[in-house]
C-alpha cells in the first residue's frame, strides 16, 4: 500500500487503517508466544486486550531486551579497552628505569633509552631529585637538583645527580632539629626521604632555568609520571 505525501485527513485515515491491519496481523502470533514461555494463564486475558495495548506491551518488551543487550555490549567493550578508551600516543615503550642506586651525596638512575625513542627528535631527558616534605608542595619546592640533559638513544643511559647546596642545607637543618634536647655524642636515628622524577626538556633548554619541578612544563617539558597519570602519554609494557 502506497500513501501520497499529503496532509489530508484521507491520508491520515489510510495510515490508521494500515496500522490497525498490522495489529490484527500480529495478535494471533503474540498469544502462542506468551503461552510458550510459561505465561499461559495470561492467554485468556490477552485475547480480550485491545490491539493497541498488545502493541504497546510488545514494544515495551522489545525495548527492555534491547536495553539489556546494549548494557552487556557496553560492559564487554569496557572490559577489553584500557581506561580512557582507545590507546593514544605518544608512547613510553617498555620499562623506563632499569636500575638505581643511592650515593653518599646523591643518586644515580639507569634508564632504558629505547623507552623514550618517540621523543628523541625534540627532547633531551633529565632526572630531578628533591626532598620529600609534606609541608611543602613538591612541584614548588626549590630544594631540588636537576641532572645534565642527556640525548635520547636506544641504549642504557646512566644519569647521576649530586645533592645541591639547598638540599644539603635542608638535611643539616633537619638533623639539627632532630638533635634538640639530646646530649652531644648521643647516637640518634635520622633519615631523609627523597623523591625522584624523570622529565623531558625541549632541546636547547637551559637546565639552570629549572629551579622547581613546575618549571618543567613551564618551559615546554614533560614530567613523565604526570604525563602518564593525566593520560597524555601511554605506557606500553
Image (tube, helix red, strand yellow):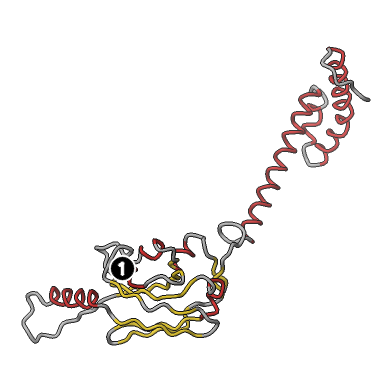
Quarter of the image where one finds residue 87: bottom right
Q: Is residue 161 left or right of residue 72?
A: left
Residue 141 spot, x, y in % from top left = 28, 65
Give the total number of marks visible in the rendering: 1
Q: Is residue 182 left or right of residue 96?
A: left
- Residue 161 at what x, y percent from top left? 34, 81
Tell me the quarter of the picture where residue 133 sits. bottom left
Between 163 and 96, the residue placed more toward the observer is 163
Image height check: is 40 above or below 213? above
The reply, left or right, for residue 82 in relation to residue 222 is right
Label 1 neighbour load within 10 Å: few <14, some 14-19, many 20+: some
Q: Residue at x 44, y 66 (%)?
A: 221
User: Where does label 1 land, which residue?
Assistant: 211
Which residue is more in the foreground, 105 or 77?
105
The C terminus, quarter of image? bottom right
- Furthest residue in direction top, as rendered: 9
Residue name at image x 20 percent, y 79 percent? 190
On screen, residue 77 versus residue 107, left or right, reads: right
Amino acid at each position: 500500500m502506497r500513501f501520497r505525501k499529503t496532509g489530508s485527513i484521507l491520508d491520515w485515515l489510510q495510515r490508521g487503517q494500515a496500522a490497525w491491519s498490522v495489529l490484527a496481523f500480529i495478535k494471533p502470533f503474540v498469544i502462542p508466544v506468551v503461552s510458550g514461555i510459561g505465561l499461559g494463564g495470561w492467554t485468556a486475558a490477552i485475547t480480550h486486550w485491545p490491539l493497541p495495548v498488545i502493541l504497546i506491551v510488545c514494544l515495551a518488551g522489545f525495548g527492555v531486551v534491547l536495553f539489556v543487550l546494549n548494557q552487556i555490549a557496553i560492559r564487554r567493550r569496557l572490559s577489553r579497552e584500557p581506561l580512557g578508551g582507545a590507546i593514544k600516543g605518544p608512547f613510553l615503550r617498555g620499562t623506563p628505569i632499569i636500575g638505581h642506586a643511592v650515593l653518599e651525596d646523591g643518586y644515580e638512575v639507569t634508564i632504558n633509552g629505547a623507552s623514550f625513542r618517540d621523543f628523541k627528535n625534540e627532547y633531551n631527558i633529565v632526572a630531578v631529585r628533591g626532598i620529600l616534605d609534606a609541608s611543602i608542595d613538591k612541584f614548588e619546592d626549590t630544594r631540588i637538583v636537576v641532572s645534565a640533559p642527556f640525548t635520547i638513544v636506544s641504549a642504557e643511559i646512566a644519569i647521576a645527580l649530586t645533592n645541591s647546596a639547598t638540599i644539603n642545607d635542608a638535611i643539616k637543618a633537619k638533623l639539627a632539629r632532630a638533635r634538640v634536647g639530646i646530649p652531644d655524642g648521643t647516637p640518634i636515628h635520622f633519615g631523609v626521604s627523597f623523591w625522584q622524577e624523570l622529565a623531558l626538556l625541549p632541546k636547547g633548554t637551559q637546565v639552570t632555568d629549572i629551579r622547581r619541578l613546575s618549571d618543567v612544563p613551564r618551559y615546554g617539558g614533560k614530567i613523565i609520571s604526570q604525563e602518564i597519570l593525566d593520560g597524555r602519554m601511554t605506557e606500553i609494557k
